[in-house]
Image (cartoon, rainbow, N blue to C red):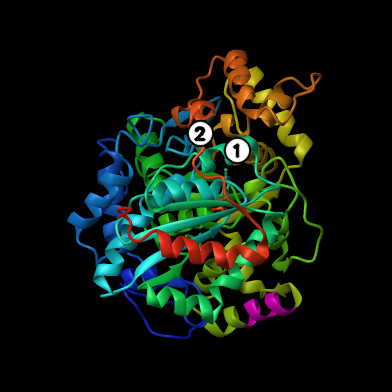
């Protein structure tokens, strides 16, 4: 099986080339030409590394199963994940919560970013790419840290992360400035996320920068969630959740299940769609948004319109108005009508809006359902679920839980439901404490102290990656302005000669 652009341009490529290049030459996203069907998981079950190997081997046939086993083993090793079952499925009331945050950075992005660098490293070999890769990232929080942990000390790669000096939480900042690794750089940019993002985009399009890179035998790349190497590993945990339900006798093997997904860039939920195409018995994929509810409107009406106020919410990783991975769903729902997809994406670019036809919408609605939850509703959900079930939700997962309740009440659907949990509640300790103690003021600038308070209040333990943060040595103190970012990149290129730090 191969990959082609969702917009019809360029060549059909193998998986390694899709991963190496990230995006197709015509600006489209790489989509699989066909998808193999896998057997439905049974109660017998295999470990996560084995399961991930099977799923990846099905979608990346140009990698050998042995290569993929090694990648999976390195990514999901016992010293990286703080639980033996990698992605535990926890019964909470009548639902099940799939905890995707037991990796090194306590957010679900680890599921993809722990393995993607290994897939990238192999892709360089397979495509006979002679340059090494410099990964540039502008981050609003979770992605930066997960990418740093994933790429650190991976052969033939280096990573430089820019985070906005205003706009990441104290936990997130501490996670990044204490980063270990010989091929990593972390720099604060004066300004907000948009400033950092603008600076990185300029570097990507600079001819001068490209020449400098070429001299050092480097190419720029990104760790963005539109890369197939980030999407493919996420398919595996849908199979894992299903296997857990069979194993514990919660469902009969072969019976349908629903998944509720807290959604931002549409990568997580799209992996569920691919799992369904690959034969996993999924009845509905429920797309949960926060106040930035552009996807709710789209999935209900077929009109995508980003012309609306941007809300900064308590679930910041879902504060997105352009969900890039939706383009892939449009491709599949139109049976690969690249003319239509290109036209819609052109309209989105030019006017911020497009409307799909009734037939395509009906096809999408046969699987997807959508709603959103406000900040107040999410806070109330965190409190209620704690009081009634003694289970702690982070603010992103709370959005999904809230939408799951609305879905079940409105549709009377009794299909077993899995709620995907995308972050440890400790990563957003200030918000979670505020939800549990609505009458007490919680200071936001002492977040590291708040981890301990949350742990004392609930009896839940702080994830190991966050527990030691306060004591960890700060290694990255560099700051810059947007206009000096190119100089920072140049310095990094000159002074870090290879990924072993020599
Ligand atoms: C990135 C992220 C999301 C959104 O996932 P998408 O794949 O972008 O839809 C949700 N929750 C958390 C905690 C995240 O870090």
Dot 1 or dot 2: first in sequence order is 2
Mark 1 neighbour density, 10 Å: few (under 14) some (14–19) many (20 or more): many
Query: Is 223 part of what is drawn in magenta?
Result: no
Q: Between label 1 and label 2, give the one nearer the viewer.
A: 1
Q: Which residues make up the magenta segment?
A: 343-350
Q: Height in image: 185 above or below 41?
A: below
Task: Residue 74: name its quadrant.
Answer: top left
Q: Tell me what residue is drawn at x 46 percent, y 32 percent.
A: 465
Query: What is the quadrant of the N terminus in the image?
Result: bottom left
Which residue is more in the foreground, 191 or 370?
191
Q: Residue at x 43, y 38 (%)?
A: 104
Quick one: 161 or 241, which is closer to the camera? 161
Left or right, 467 with respect to 68, comes to: right
Rendered location of residue 474, percent (x, y): 51, 37
Residue identifier under label 2 = 97
Residue 345, magenta (yes or no): yes
* Residue at the image position 41 percent from the left and 40 percent from the top: 241
The location of residue 393, given as percent across then percent down, is 60, 30
**In the image, is residue 474 above or below residue 498?**
above
Q: Main secondary structure of the magenta part?
A: helix
Can I make out residue 280 in this image? no
| Figure quadrant of residue 87 | top left
* Quadrant into which the C terminus falls: bottom left
Q: Is mark 1 within 8 Å of ligand 1?
A: yes
Secondary structure of the residue carrying numbered label 1: helix
Question: In the figure, 404 relative to 195: above or below?
Answer: above
Question: Where is residue 326 shown, x and y percent of the image?
Answer: 58, 65
**Dot 2: what SS?**
strand
Residue placed under numbered mark 1 in the picture:
397
In the rendered image, residue 184, in percent from the top left (x then y), is placed at 43, 52
Label 1–label 2 contact, CB within 8 A:
yes
């Amino acid at each position: 099986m191969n990959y082609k652009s969702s917009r019809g341009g360029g060549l059909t490529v193998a998986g390694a080339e899709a991963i190496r290049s990230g995006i197709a030459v015509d600006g489209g996203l790489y989509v699989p030409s066909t998808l193999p069907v896998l057997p439905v998981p049974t109660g017998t079950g295999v470990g996560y590394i084995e399961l991930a190997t099977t799923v990846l081997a099905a979608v990346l046939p140009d990698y050998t199963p042995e290569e993929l086993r090694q990648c999976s083993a390195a990514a999901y090793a016992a010293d990286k994940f703080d639980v033996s079952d990698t992605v535990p499925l926890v019964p909470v009331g009548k639902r099940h919560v799939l905890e995707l945050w037991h990796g090194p950075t306590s957010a679900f992005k680890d599921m993809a970013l722990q393995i993607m660098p290994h897939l990238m490293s192999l892709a360089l070999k397979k495509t006979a790419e002679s340059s090494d890769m410099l990964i540039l990232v502008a981050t609003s929080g979770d992605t930066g840290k997960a990418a740093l942990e994933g790429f650190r000390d991976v052969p033939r790669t280096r990573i430089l992360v820019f985070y906005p000096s205003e706009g990441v939480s104290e936990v997130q900042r501490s996670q990044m400035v204490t980063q270990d690794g010989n091929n990593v750089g972390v720099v604060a940019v004066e300004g907000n996320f948009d400033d950092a993002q603008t600076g990185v985009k300029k570097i990507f399009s600079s001819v001068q920068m490209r020449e400098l890179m070429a001299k050092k035998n480097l190419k720029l790349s990104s760790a963005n969630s539109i890369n197939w190497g980030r999407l493919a590993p996420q398919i595996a945990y849908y199979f894992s959740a299903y296997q857990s339900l069979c194993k514990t006798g919660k469902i009969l093997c072969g019976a349908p299940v629903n998944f509720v997904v807290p959604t931002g860039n549409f990568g997580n939920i799209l992996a569920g769609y691919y799992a369904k195409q690959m034969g996993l018995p999924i009845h509905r994929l429920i797309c949960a948004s926060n106040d930035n509810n552009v996807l709710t409107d789209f999935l209900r009406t077929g009109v995508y319109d980003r012309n609306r106020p941007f809300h900064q919410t308590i679930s910041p990783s879902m504060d997105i108005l352009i969900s890039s991975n939706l383009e892939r769903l449009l491709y599949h729902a139109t049976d690969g009508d690249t003319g239509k997809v290109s036209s819609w994406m052109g309209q989105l670019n030019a006017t911020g809006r497009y409307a799909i036809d009734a037939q395509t919408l009906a096809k999408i609605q046969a699987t997807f359902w959508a709603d959103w939850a406000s900040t107040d509703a999410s806070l109330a959900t965190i409190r209620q679920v704690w009081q009634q079930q003694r289970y702690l939700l982070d603010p992103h997962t709370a959005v999904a839980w809230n939408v799951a309740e609305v879905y079940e009440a409105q549709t009377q659907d009794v299909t077993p439901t899995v709620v995907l949990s995308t972050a440890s509640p400790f990563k957003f300790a200030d918000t979670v404490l505020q939800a549990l103690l609505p009458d007490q003021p919680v200071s936001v600038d002492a977040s590291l102290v708040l981890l301990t308070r949350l742990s004392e209040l609930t009896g839940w333990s702080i994830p190991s990656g966050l527990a030691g943060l306060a004591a960890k040595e700060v290694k990255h103190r560099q700051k810059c302005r947007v206009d000096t970012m190119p100089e920072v990149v140049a310095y990094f290129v000159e002074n870090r000669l290879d990924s072993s730090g020599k």
